[in-house]
Image (cartoon, grey):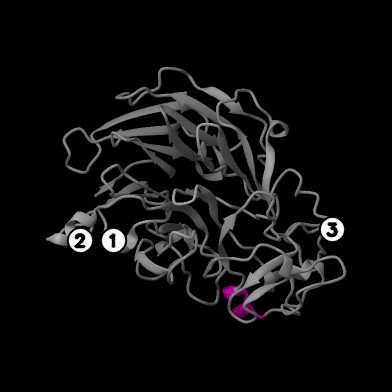
Amino acid sequence: HPVSSLDEPRCLAVTPSGDVFVAINSPQNNQPAFGIVGLRDNNGDGRADEQSRFSPRLGGSGIAWGRGLLYFGANDRVLRFRLPSGRLTPTDNGEVVVSGLPNTNDHISKTVVLADRNRLFVNIGSASNACQVLNRIPQSPGVFPCPELPVRAGVWQFNARGTNQTQANGFRYATGLRNMVALAINPQNNELYGVQHGRDMLFENWPQFFTVEEDAVLPSEEFIRIERGSDNGWPYCYHDAVFERRKVLAPEYGGDGKKVRNKQINCAKFNQPLVTFGAHWAPNGLHFYSGDQFPRKYRGGAFVAFHGGFDRAPLPNEGFQVQFVPFGRNGRPSGRAETFADGFAGPTQPLPAEARHRPVGVTEGPDGSLYISDDRGGRIWRVVFVGNGEGRDDRDDRD
């Protein structure tokens, strides 16, 4: 059931009553008329027939709901709106939770995740592709130590109930994360997980080490558990799931596609992925399923929405899909990833600018249905399971 005609819908939040709130961004960093759109289905037909629009002239990607409060991750700040039960429009103009967040160069989207009423996680992406002296320029070496890491390329924790905080009021929860837009809490263990955007331009910048075909399939998009104090290794290392099947040293730091360490860096010591996905798929949404509408195998598992990437020539573009990863109670995957929804881009696997639809956010409604945002087609897709009752809880076993 698609809802259409939205401009650049990004992440999603759904309230216990079923209202859907959508973060709105704009191309080329222009500001949209409104940063948040609220959607309500009054007659139960699966299509929104009432809208609200607020947070004027401030675009962003992140959004989170908790206890009557809506958090909005604009590109340079986090706002908090009060939305008592039954309201589609807030009762205030929004409080500033955090301001002055880095908002320049490569990765500016902010994801916001509520761990509980006190802890708010915010992704702050890197300002560059690989922390080179000259960003994205052939043969330019990497800077060591990378000066971005104290303020970018990580996840920061802030006081969710605080106001007028700056980045200095929070603390760097984890580092070495190039761009962790797909970020979520796993309710099974209340731990933070994410799927990282891997680096680009191995062939373009280092053709002496990589062919164009190798560049198309490297590096992995990494699904990781993000523990406090962990380091995922960007920009010094990247993960190769195709040839070496491990983290290897980046060419900016003396790597050649095979080396694992130099005198200062050992890639084996950094955080390692739980699951890997294809290169340049661009993971933008992550959600752990807690409902019982879908069949039992989906319970506790993770849905990952991929935006589709651009750096896969001469191979066909990939991504533009939603993958599912089953999880066990131990907080680790219990099986291989599988395609859940595909075909968004169209039949020819085009470049992103030519795709019909591009998934971004993924979340769950109170009835267990799944919502997927699409910032290319301007749609919100609602996925429902129609079957014989196998998706319901364990009481169905006696039927």
Q: Which residue appears at 67% of the width and 59% of the height?
A: 232
Magenta stretch: helix, strand or loop mostly: helix
Determine which residue is flagged by label 3. 144
**Left or right: 107 with respect to 274?**
right
Q: Is residue 198 magenta?
A: no
| Residue 88 vertical placement versus 356 (above, below) | above
Q: Position of residue 24 (x, y in %)?
A: 45, 38
Regarding mark 2 in the picture, which secondary structure is present there? loop
Q: Position of residue 133 (x, y in %)?
A: 82, 57
Determine which residue is flagged by label 2. 390
In-front residue for pair 93/195: 195
In-front residue for pair 49/193: 193
Q: Nearer the viewer, mark 3 or mark 1?
A: 1
In-front residue for pair 35/298: 298
The magenta segment is 211-217
Q: Tell me the crowding category of disc 1: few under 14, some 14 to 19, or many 20 or more residues within 10 angstroms, Cα based.
A: some
Regarding mark 3 in the picture, which secondary structure is present there? loop
Earlier along the polypeptide chain: callout 3 or callout 2? Answer: 3
| Circles 1 and 2: CB atoms closer than 8 Å | yes
| Residue 89 vertical placement versus 376 (above, below) | above
Q: Is residue 213 magenta?
A: yes
Mark yes or no: residue 163 visible: yes
Determine which residue is flagged by label 1. 296
Q: Tell me the crowding category of disc 2: few under 14, some 14 to 19, or many 20 or more residues within 10 angstroms, Cα based.
A: some
